[in-house]
């Protein structure tokens, strides 16, 4: 057992840290200004420029297999990279990657969708959630009915990240009602790759945070048979795999963000004086700093454990749920304390704390709510799928 980073991991961490400090953090004021003017956080051209700069620094396709031109850094490295990138709210994502489930495509689909997504020529989104089916993914109502060589899709999806910008969506629809009922939603659904120009419409959803997902409407959208992703009637597992991928990453993001926030609070507490001394000398403030530091550290190790487990080729779902549940809640506790330490200034829009406060609230909701993570963790223990301890 070795509880320290290897030299290689430290090198990657330092390189990405420098990139974040040099290229991303200086853009924070511009991002805040643009968002307050109701504009996208950064223009697409600027984001592309940043992706190419990251590529020069060796960060391109960080989770993409080498045969597709990626760096395939592994999950531990990814965790470290996400923690660093999340120290800023500049909405940067690395180039050269694609959704995990697109790799299940056949050769033709890989040429048409996977490779252009990796190369940044096409944007994708994934749609499982519907107005009547969020946590209960087995309750979807969207249907796909076969007509000759095509499937006709009807229904609605909601809260789809990237749905306003995507060129195509991977949408889950019921293809066999009887099988769907008999298997309680686990079979009889299929994942379709649907180009925007096949006719689905998207509508921006305004949220508390700074990026808006989309509602999607499918009204007799005709999709060719060859656009089925994976196997017919077996789309449910693809859906779970897509959702599962990002789960522990939410925890990693929370760790990075909380670390930056806590550092802001430490710096502020040393400067801000009340009743003749810095507030850093008050026990009330010291305890908030100490509790936050312990909270961050606990979340970090849960995240690293989830990532490490996956790197060993083991099933990490139990640990991913723990990392997501604890990380998301830790992030909310820390941002709240950091706002408290900043007093009135923390509540203003002069500082980015209120922005992070709004963003952090989402972490407890998407990719499976707190309650769903608890349900998974307790079910694994009660059914004996996982034992306590290591
Ligand atoms: C900004 C944003 C982006 C998103 N991006 C995507 C995306 O790209 N693709 C996609 O498919 N979806 C996406 N989602 C959907 C997201 O995954 C769902 O919102 C989430 O799973 C919760 O579903 P719901 O909103 O329907 O809440 P519900 O399922 O209706 O839950 C309501 C409340 O009941 C609780 N609850 C539900 N069931 C139980 C239970 N069995 N036991 C105890 N409590 C329970 C929940 O925890 C919650 O507190 C996104 C959501 C948001 C807000």
Image (cartoon, grey):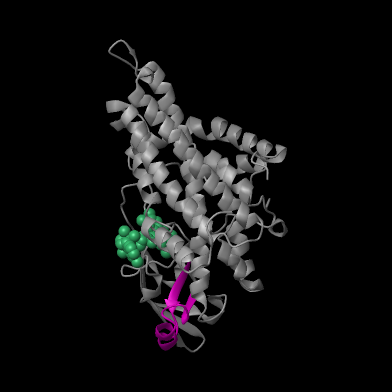
Question: Residue 324 magenta-drawn?
Answer: no
**Residue shown at 51% from the left, 53% from the top:** 248
Percent across and percent down for residue 129 are 38, 66
Magenta stretch? 169-191
Question: Left or right of 253: which side holds 287?
Answer: left
Quadrant holding the N terminus = top right
Percent across and percent down for residue 351 are 36, 30
Between 193 and 4, the residue placed more toward the observer is 4
**Residue shown at 37% from the left, 17% from the top:** 281
Percent across and percent down for residue 134 are 36, 65
Vertical position of residue 350 compared to residue 115: above or below: above
Based on the displayed image, in which of its 4 quarters is residue 371 positioned? Answer: bottom left
Question: Residue 171 magenta-drawn?
Answer: yes
Quadrant holding the C terminus = bottom right
Q: Quadrant of ligand 1?
A: bottom left
Vertical position of residue 296 compared to residue 229: above or below: above
**Residue shown at 42% from the left, 68% from the top:** 128
Question: Left or right of 136: which side holds 380?
Answer: right
Percent across and percent down for residue 202 are 37, 63
- Would residue 149 be visible to someone looking at this image? yes
Between 151 and 2, the residue placed more toward the observer is 2
Based on the displayed image, in which of its 4 quarters is residue 80 positioned? Answer: top right
């Amino acid at each position: 057992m070795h509880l320290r980073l290897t030299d290689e991991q430290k090198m990657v961490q330092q390189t990405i840290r420098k990139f974040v400090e040099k290229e991303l953090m200086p853009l924070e004021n511009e991002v805040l200004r643009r968002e307050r003017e109701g504009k996208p956080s950064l223009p697409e051209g600027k984001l592309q420029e940043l992706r190419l700069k990251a590529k020069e620094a060796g960060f391109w396709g960080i989770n993409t297999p080498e045969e597709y031109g990626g760096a395939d850094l592994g999950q531990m490295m990814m965790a470290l990279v996400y923690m660093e990138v999340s120290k800023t709210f500049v909405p940067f994502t690395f180039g050269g990657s694609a959704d995990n489930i697109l790799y299940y495509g056949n050769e033709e689909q890989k040429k048409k969708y996977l490779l252009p997504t990796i190369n940044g020529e096409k944007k994708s989104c994934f749609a499982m959630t519907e107005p009547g089916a969020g946590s209960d993914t087995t309750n979807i109502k969207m249907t796909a009915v076969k007509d000759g060589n095509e499937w006709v899709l009807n229904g609605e999806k909601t809260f789809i990240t990237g749905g306003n910008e995507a060129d195509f969506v991977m949408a889950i629809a019921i293809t066999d009602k009887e099988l769907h009922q008999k298997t309680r939603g686990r079979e009889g659904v299929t994942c379709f790759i649907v180009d925007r120009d096949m006719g689905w419409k998207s509508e921006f959803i305004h949220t508390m945070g700074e990026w808006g997902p989309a509602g999607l409407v499918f009204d007799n959208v005709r999709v060719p048979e060859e656009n089925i992703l994976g196997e017919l009637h077996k789309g449910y597992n693809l859906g779970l795999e897509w959702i599962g991928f990002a789960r522990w990453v939410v925890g990693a993001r929370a760790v990075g963000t909380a670390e930056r926030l806590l550092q802001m609070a430490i710096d502020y507490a040393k400067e801000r004086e009340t009743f003749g001394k810095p507030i850093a000398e008050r026990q009330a403030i010291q305890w908030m700093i100490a509790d936050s530091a312990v909270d961050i550290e606990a979340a970090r190790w849960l995240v690293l454990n989830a990532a490490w487990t996956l790197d060993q080729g083991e099933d990490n779902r139990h640990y991913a749920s723990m990392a997501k549940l604890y990380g998301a809640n830790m992030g909310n506790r820390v941002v709240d304390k950091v706002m408290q330490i900043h007093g009135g200034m923390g509540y203003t829009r002069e500082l980015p704390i209120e922005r992070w406060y709004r963003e952090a609230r989402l972490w407890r909701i998407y990719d499976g709510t707190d309650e769903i993570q608890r349900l998974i963790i307790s079910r694994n223990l009660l059914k004996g799928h996982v034992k306590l301890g290591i």
